[in-house]
Image (tube, rainbow, N blue to C red):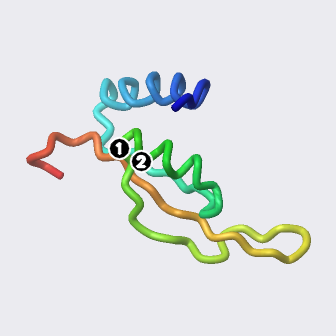
């Protein structure tokens, strides 16, 4: 499976966050963007909630967002 630029960015982001002693990276993804959700799961992000109707489009359509987190803590501290 090829993710191209997204994979390159993630390969830079995770070590960058580790070097700065960050504990967690949090992001939100539109729930209908299954490819992005699967990509983040592949990068060890875990879905932990849904923000219902988080985005309102001009046509008054509402979109949910999936909240995802990637822990940078050692396994014993998670």
Q: Name the residue under label 2.
A: 41
Outermost residue on the front side: it is: 1
Outermost residue on the left side: it is: 76
Q: In x, y percent, where is residue 7?
A: 51, 28
Is residue 66 left or right of 44 when viewed as pictured?
Answer: right
Q: Which quadrant of the structure image shows residue 51?
A: bottom right
Outermost residue on the right side: it is: 59
Q: What element carries label 2?
A: helix
What is the CA distance from the residue labelled 1 to the residue labelled 2? 5 Å
Q: Mark 1 points at which residue?
A: 44
Is residue 38 left or right of 44 when viewed as pictured?
Answer: right
Q: What element carries label 1?
A: loop
Q: Do the residues labelled 1 and 2 touch (CB within 8 Å)?
A: yes
Q: In this view, does 33 lie above or below 9?
A: below
Q: Is residue 8 above or below residue 17?
A: above
Q: In x, y percent, where is residue 61?
A: 81, 75
Q: In x, y percent, where is residue 29?
A: 58, 55
Q: In this view, does 31 lie above or below 34?
A: below
Q: In x, y percent, where is residue 47?
A: 41, 60
Instruction: Residue at 51% x, 71% y: name it.
Output: 50
Instruction: Residue at 37% x, 55% y: name it.
Output: 46
């Amino acid at each position: 499976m090829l993710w191209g630029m997204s994979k390159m960015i993630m390969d830079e982001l995770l070590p960058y966050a580790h070097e700065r002693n960050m504990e967690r990276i949090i992001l939100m993804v539109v729930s209908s963007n299954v490819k992005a959700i699967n990509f983040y799961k592949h990068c060890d992000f875990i879905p932990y909630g849904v923000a219902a109707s988080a985005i309102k489009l001009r046509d008054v359509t509402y979109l949910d967002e999936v909240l995802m987190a990637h822990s940078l803590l050692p396994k014993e501290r998670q």
